[in-house]
Image: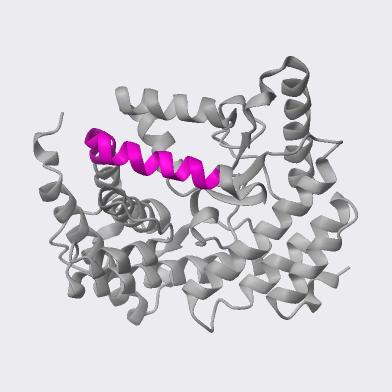
Amino acid sequence: MGEEMHYKDVSELSEALGRAGDARELAGLTRGVRAFVAGRAESGDVLDTGRAAAALYDGLLARAAVLARDRPPGGFCLAALGSQARGEQFLATDQDNALILPDPADAPEAREAWTAFAARLRDVLAAAGLPPCPKGIMAATPEWRRTLREWREALDAAADRPDAGGVLLVSLLADVRAVWGDPALAEALAGQVRRHAADAPLLVRGLAREALRFAPESGFPGPFSGFGKNHTSLDLKRAAVYPLALGVKALALEAGLTETGTVERLDGLVRRGLVGGELGARLTRAFACVQGLRLRAQARALAAGRAPDNLIERDALPVTDREALRQALHAVAELAAVLEHHFGLAYLT
């Protein structure tokens, strides 16, 4: 009991993950990963902590795949999606992954083998403490388990008709990153996303419009305005992380950037003169602020025996955090205004 508390650095934990012999041992290491990440909540660079956490969850996912395999054919890629792929993960985690299969996987017997592997992977991860994605965005769902040709066909369809499903597909695949298997498959898929972003501007505008659905309005009168009337809690992921990461992603895709992390994308946009240096710095500070608030709240929940989430309570925030959050929400609202103007979203129906 408590073995998970003894790991002090990423390399030691990564080595232990790579040696795990079964799902039960992996579950103990998952607790160790969370204890390690929570232990950094009050010190260090929160963005570095997110990258370290993502590296550890990569190791967990890769080891779970090894434990789940049963003579699988080669030439495939197990990829991370979402905040895990961007290196922005903390304690509130579930299964966000996809399989990119070789085109010979079209054969019925190969399909059956990959279906069984994906189901075992889901079950190993669940037993290790990572619940299935409630939206089904994981390799165990057929839509997230395709050959490279099928992924390309799905992107072609999204470009031809950029509806909500197509925008979600592009958003997730824009962050895709190989964790286990052939990384060339993930790189090919990411390249296809960038090509479609260049050729189908409505896809990118759809991403920007999605960011505006969650972004706070500009002109906040006080530090609690982001909470809304009569509400004392705020979902930081929905109100700040999601619109900021998605809005920056839209601009980065339009510019053809290859970076996947939000801060790295921001840096690339500033270097190209597509985002002003002052705004870029404010957005980076805003991102670090809300990520820090999320991590500290999640660490407190974990210590209290509660499931970590993305909520913060207004009355529990120190004055300095209230002011920092107010400024962060202002920066996100400013990004929303930039997106609305840049993409002409006021005229997009």
User: Image quadrant of residue 224?
Assistant: bottom left
Segment tinted magenta in the rendering: 186-206
Q: Is the residue 128 above or below the residue 195 in the image?
A: below
> Which residue is at a point 38% across and 26% down the rendered structure image?
156
Q: Is the residue 188 above or below the residue 177 in the image?
A: above
Is 188 colored magenta in this rendering?
A: yes
Is 127 colored magenta in this rendering?
A: no
The picture places residue 287, in percent across and down from the top left corner, at: 36, 67
The picture places residue 15, in percent across and down from the top left corner, at: 79, 69
Q: Is the residue 93 above or below the residue 316 in the image?
A: above
Is 5 displayed left or right of 57 in the figure? right
Nearer to me, 126 or 320: 126
Is 280 displayed left or right of 109 in the figure? left
User: Image quadrant of residue 39?
Assistant: bottom right
> Which residue is at a point 13% across and 49% down the rendered structure image?
342
> Which residue is at a point 18% across and 61% down the rendered structure image?
274
